[in-house]
Image (spheres, grey):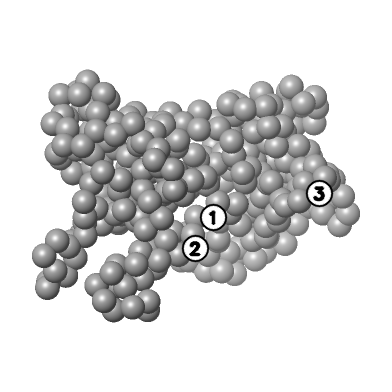
Amino acid sequence: MSPSTRGTTSRGGPGRDAPDGLLAASGREARASRPRPALAVGAVLLAVAILVSFASPRISDRLQRRSTIALVDGEFALARERAREARRFDPLSVGPLLALAAGYAAAFVRTRPELKRPDAQLYFINFSTAKRGGVLHPWSGFTLSVSQLQAESRGSVRIQSPDPRAAPAIRYNYLATENDCRVMVEGLKIARRIAQAAPLAGYVVREEFPGPQVKSDAELLEVVRQSGETVFHPTSTCRMGADERSVVDSRLRVRGVAGLRVVDASVMPAVVSGNTNAAVIAVAEKAADLIHSERGGGPS
């Protein structure tokens, strides 16, 4: 969920003897920022001398977060037209040129023809930088980014200190499986084919990154390992399920703890194929319906 909701615990309204506690946090903090006395893996918490009120092996190391890699094409042939457009605006004002989204075009693609659904997402961005949030390149360029949709790799979030303000130890463990590596490499190849095909190819002077000298699968994978970044969307540290090893049940109630629900992206068994925003809203709306019906209000 958004940073404004992280680590938030709210209580049910008046008129109920045992109102539900609702934990809404980000996927990484749902595991690491429980209010003390703590709810987490007991062995990890005891190692940093935190009072444990409920220890469960179910809060397992299942963190997922998608990675991305960018293909940057330099010397976009529309540079002169862009410059003329820029001169229409006061450089200190925010005009249409500066009102940029995260991506102006996107595509969900299959990296293998036999797949039944896409396994990678492409983003087209009409500017280029050396890294996310960095300074614009001195030449006109564009970026094609690739991210994997159904990532298999699992990481972990572990508390490091009894101080609730201390950052947790986060291990994303990207590219831990052969398929995750394959999807990112094949995704880069697809991005290259798009940039090298008409009509886009007519506007491209050169590939700036990773550059035409990077050709083999092994070389592309090394680029992904060294230069890949996150697309955020951490999930799955408090998995929902019907089995006893799941952290929450189908009504989002924490197993073994009365009156506590988890309502955020951490309850997803696996990261969704796309941005998590809509899915988290659906989880929150479902939780509201469940609580409303349990209080005798019926489904809303």
- Callout 3: 10 Å neighbours few (<14), some, many (20+)? some
* Pair 3/2: label in front: 2
* Pair 3/1: label in front: 1
- Could one spot residue 261 in this view of the protein? yes
SS at circle 2: helix
Quarter of the image containing the C terminus?
A: bottom left
Counting residues from the start of the chain, the first of labels 3 and 1 encountered is: 3
Residue 11 appears at what percent x and percent y? 18, 61
SS at circle 1: loop
Q: Amino acid at mark 3?
A: Ile
Residue underneath mark 1: 275
Q: Amino acid at mark 1?
A: Asn
Residue at (14% x, 69% y) in the render: 16
> How many labels, in total?
3
Is 134 or 278 nearer to us in this picture? 278
Is 86 or 241 nearer to us in this picture? 241
**Marks 2 and 1 close (CB-CB < 8 Å):** yes
Is 33 or 21 nearer to us in this picture? 21
Residue at (49% x, 39% y) in the render: 64
Residue underneath mark 3: 194
Residue 137 appears at what percent x and percent y? 61, 43
- Callout 1: 10 Å neighbours few (<14), some, many (20+)? some
- Could one spot residue 6 in this view of the protein? no
Q: Where on the picture, by quarter, is residue 247?
A: top left
SS at circle 3: helix
Residue underneath mark 2: 278
How far is disc 2 from disc 1 in space, using C-alphas?
Answer: 7 Å
Residue 51 appears at what percent x and percent y? 13, 31
Residue at (39% x, 33% y) in the render: 60
